[in-house]
Amino acid sequence: MSVRRVVLVGAGGHGRGTLEILRARLAAGLPCPEPVGFVDDDPARAGAEVGGLPVLGPIDRLLEMADGGETGAILAIASAAAKRALAARIEAAGIPWVTAVHPSAIVGAGTLVGEGAIVGAGVVVAYDTRIGRHVTVNLNATVGHDCVVGDYSTIAPGVNVTGNVAIGEGVEIQTNATIVPGVSIGEGAQVGPGSVVLRDVPAGELVFGNPARKMPRPGSGSRA
């Protein structure tokens, strides 16, 4: 049974942007289920409207909507940890995933885009790259050839990931950062805005600057 409707998980700015991608696909006549609303665990958003669609309630409301595959979901949130936890709950309910690729995005030959991924307007992904499950590649970002982007990772607007880069699971690369060719970024690492990453980043590390250097995590009490 094909997915006919989609509920967006997360009613914040990322959710609003994802809704615009889905609407752009519909306007272009591309395959896309009909967006019917949002779910969000923030009680302040219950009953509100986002982009003209209702916030249907908390995420448990989505789980109640399981209907044999006609209603799908998309994780329209940036936090890798939150995406990972919610994916397990939603999959357990048997709700299928929807992938959203903006009509203006360019995806090269041999590139694979995982289920639930979000690829925004103006994005360019070169050939023979693998975009993992529930990855977000946001506005005008570029991802070069022969890259791997791990599940649940987020690439913010304007980021330039060059060729042969390996990005682990749950990585967050913030606005306008540049990753030079051949670099590996470990699972759960974060790259600060505008940073230029010239060497490998270990798992869980936060780096920032040009060139990017290790920084203390907020609340860690460590020194740079």
Image (cartoon, grey):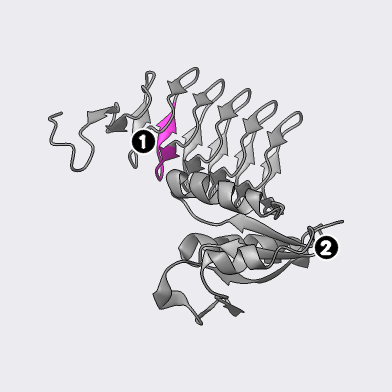
Q: Quadrant of the N terminus?
A: bottom right
* Magenta span of residues: 172-179
| Residue 203 percent coordinates (x, y) | 38, 25
Mark 1 vs mark 2: which is more N-terminal?
A: 2
| Residue type highlighted by circle 2 | Gly
* 164 relative to 40, above or below: above
Residue 170: image tag: none
Residue 14 can be seen in this image: yes
Q: Are marks 1 and 2 in contact (CB under 8 Å)?
A: no
What residue appears at the point 12 percent right and 30 percent down from the top-left corner? 223
Identify which residue, 147 or 188, lies in the foreground: 188
- Count of marks placed on residues: 2
Q: Quadrant of the C terminus?
A: top left
* 21 relative to 53, above or below: above
* 144 relative to 159, above or below: above
The residue wearing badge 2 is 29
Is 52 in the magenta? no
| Residue 86 percent coordinates (x, y) | 53, 51
Dot 2 crowding, Cα within 10 Å, few <14, some 14–19, many 20+? few
What residue appears at the point 67 percent right and 47 percent down from the top-left corner? 105
| Residue type highlighted by circle 1 | Val
Q: Secondary structure at mark 2?
A: loop
The residue wearing badge 1 is 191
What residue appears at the point 37 percent right and 18 percent down from the top-left corner? 199
| Residue 46 percent coordinates (x, y) | 48, 78
